Amino acid sequence: MNRREAIHLGAGALVGATATLAGLDRPLAAQAQVVNPTPPPQPDSRYPMPPKWNRELRQLAPNVYAYTQGGGPGLSAAGVSNAGVIVGRDHLVAIDALQGPIPARGFIAAATKATGKPFGRMILTHHHGDHVNGLQFFDPSVEILSHPYCKSEMVKAVPTVPKTWTVTPGIADQEEERHLALPTVTFRDDLVYDINGVEVQFRVVGPAHTWGDVVAYLPQHKIVFLGDVGFFWVAPYANNSWVTRWIDVCNAIIGWDVDVLVPGHGPIGGKKELAEMREYFEVLRVEARTRYEKKMPPGVAAAEIRLGRFDNWIGPERLIMDTVRWYAEWDGTLTPDYNANAVRQATIEYNEVKAKEKKVSEIIPLQRMEDLAEAV
Ligand SMILES: [Zn+2]
């Protein structure tokens, strides 16, 4: 294998070690077992590392819970999404369905144990697999609602869904039948429920993280479930995003009367954490724009850019896709779809820079970026 092939394959081939390939961003998978994730770039010791947080059902208010999945430094971000539940008179209303059999069944068991009620309704924040792949584990009578874009992307994904689950630690413990259940109700505008006296506003805020984003705002309790409009201590994933609008949506939500923000990824936080995520994009915008003006390719730009405290966030390789999305906005080529070729090309460019600098541990397996595209 020559050097060029090694760059295309990624560090695993270059250093002869598979640790960097070992499920870092495979759908959730063996993240807990990953010994040495060597995330590129290296953490910056001048800044704090993200906290650790637990998989737990946490009560936020009477009849309102968040289900967070555990995470922290050294563990991957991909697929580790959060969900919510609101307790109705007869049944539970879920916000998102999680990634696969283990998290979905864990969520269902924890919520029914805490409340003694079954799930009756499910609202999806967006179409990404780590928020919708667990739908099949909910009772088929559960009504599933989403934005029409979310549904259309899920319909497109159906032919690509494998027939069985692959055994993956943290996601699936047996090879069982797999299918993607689809929304039965779609809504284009805000939808307001009175759930057992709790007003829940499902607000259509996209395009931001995706073109179909919905957040759940509970004004009485000053709580908002952000879906993937919020990534706290986790690098935001922008493969389907319109980042300028995403920043606008963050600013709008920061203007709401709200105290508790449940992100799609990361620990529960407040407005401060959402403002931090917005700043990740703003710092990257400045850094990337300078290099865009110099006609530097996006992957080369990403290899040069340091984001200070944000370099320590989980999933730092997302800097590459996020730079690609900024470039697409400036080029006027942005579409709702993930541009797999552009991200792949940028990752190759990034790896070439790292190889030249002899920073072998920072070379990114292309497979990791492709798995990321499927997982989040
Ligand atoms: Zn997402």
Image: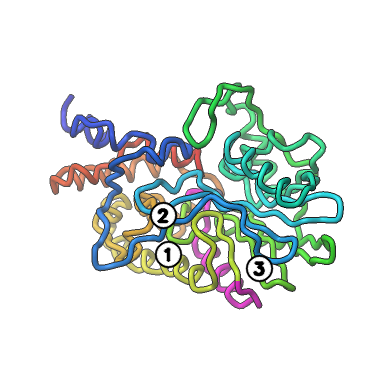
Q: Residues within 10 Å of mark 1 (few under 14, many from 20)?
A: many
Q: Quadrant of residue 256?
A: bottom right
Q: Secondary structure at mark 1?
A: helix
Is 80 contained in the magenta span? no
User: Looking at the image, how many numbered discs can be counted on the residues?
Assistant: 3
Among numbered discs 2 and 1, the one appearing first in the sequence: 1
Question: Which amino acid type is shown beneath numbered disc 2?
Answer: Asp
Span colored in magenta: 239-259
Proximity of marks 3 and 1: CB atoms separated by less than 8 Å: no
Is 249 contained in the magenta span? yes
* CA distance separating discs 3 and 2: 28 Å
Above or below, 154 relative to 95: above
Proximity of marks 2 and 1: CB atoms separated by less than 8 Å: yes
Q: Which residue is mark 1?
A: 281
Question: Which amino acid type is shown beneath numbered disc 3?
Answer: Ile
Q: Secondary structure at mark 3?
A: strand
Q: Position of residue 263 (x, y in %)?
A: 55, 59
Question: The N terminus lies in which quarter of the figure?
Answer: top left
Q: Which residue is mark 2?
A: 322
Q: Which disc, if any, is residue 328?
A: none
The reply to whether residue 147 is in sight is no
Residue at point 27% right, 31% down?
18
Q: Quadrant of residue 330?
A: bottom left
Mark 3 and ligand 1: say if the CB distance to the nearest ligand atom is below 8 Å.
no
Q: Which residue is mark 3?
A: 223
Among numbered discs 3 and 1, the one appearing first in the sequence: 3
Q: Residues within 10 Å of mark 2 (few under 14, many from 20)?
A: many
Among numbered discs 3 and 2, the one appearing first in the sequence: 3
* CA distance separating discs 3 and 1: 24 Å
Q: Residues within 10 Å of mark 3 (few under 14, many from 20)?
A: many
Question: Which amino acid type is shown beneath numbered disc 1?
Answer: Phe
